[in-house]
Image (cartoon, rainbow, N blue to C red):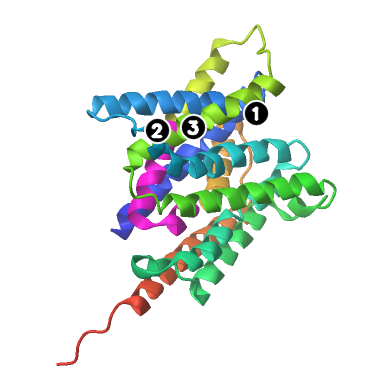
Amino acid sequence: MMNRAVAMVLLLSVVWSLSWPLIKYATFFFGPLTIVAIRMGIAGVALAIFLRVQGKSLPWPPATWLPLLPIAIFGNALPYSLVAYGQLQVPSGLSAVLVSTMPVWTVLLSHFFSNGDRAGERLNAVKLVGALVGLLGIVALVGPTALHGADAALLAELALLAASLCWAIGTIYTSFVKSIPPDQSATMTALLASLFLLPLAGAFEMPLPQDVPWQAVATLFSLGLVATAFGTLLMFRIIAQHGPTLVSLVMYIHPALALCWGAIFFGETLELRHFMAFALILGAIYLINRGRRIALARAAPAAPAE
């Protein structure tokens, strides 16, 4: 079961990490709010078609959407907007460090919602060390210069930290939404996030540029169909089957894979510290999974005496 869970996390990491070069290209033609609103809209429509092919429909009546609003806001609309704002003033290296604190927030916050069958989310020394080792791996990954310039743009740095906290809250909250199946939840949260952002994009980033190449449009569809539709559906399934802590590990693997794509597609050089960082990140994943098994074992009822 754990091997399958790790495979799902790695697949999600690959899907999401590939979105960064696409986003970079899309920003040459569209504003960040417009990119997020359109990609979420495309994802929502694609997932709705996927539901229809399966003989399912959107959750109905609209009152059933209410539990999904926090996911749409804290898991999609708000963090992506905060990241877009933060990256206007914060270097990419420091941005990666700040946003990648999400697993630490998840490990800490999940402890307070770890009763019953959620015993594996309880905090222990092994999980805490694993979270900190993963954070150390991120710092090593982006290099010692990543923290230079801290406090130069405090508000933007706080926005990036807030984005990671939003993702942690959204991930934990998602694990509590049991009334709606994962595929329906993924569809509605994407649609709701798009509806939330479209007015903001219209107010601050309109009109759209006149001469947009087809490659830019294709990029938005790739972001919507692959990174968002497939990625969100996979994320919901991981959370439903294995809990929020495991899916948060994607934020550790993310920067490592992004560096690999840079080496493959843009000829960027991988240094020794990068491989050391990869080892730290893998160690963090092992420790957090190990801590989860320890928490589950401690919570298991003792066998009755013969």
In the picture, the quarter occupied by the N terminus is bottom left
Left or right: residue 94 compared with residue 117: right
Residue 261 place in picture, x, y as percent: 54, 37
Residue 299 place in picture, x, y as percent: 35, 77
Residue at (34% x, 50% y) in the render: 178
Task: Measure how far apart labels 3 and 1 are at the Cα level.
Answer: 17 Å
> Disc 1 residue type?
Pro
> Disc 2 residue type?
Pro
In the picture, the quarter occupied by the C terminus is bottom left
Toward the viewer: 220 or 55?
55
Left or right: residue 276 compared with residue 161: left
Mark 2 / mark 1, whichever is N-terminal: 1
Image-quadrant location for residue 50: top left
Q: Mark 2 points at which residue?
A: 62
Residue at (60% x, 53% y) in the render: 165
Q: Is residue 241 magenta?
A: yes
**Which is in the foreground here, disc 2 or disc 1?**
2
Figure check: 138 above or below 30: below
Q: Is residue 306 magenta?
A: no
Q: Residue 32 carries which label?
A: 1
Crowdedness near tag 3: few (<14), some (14–19) or many (≥20) residues, C-alpha within 10 Å: many
What is the secondary structure assignment of the residue under circle 2? helix
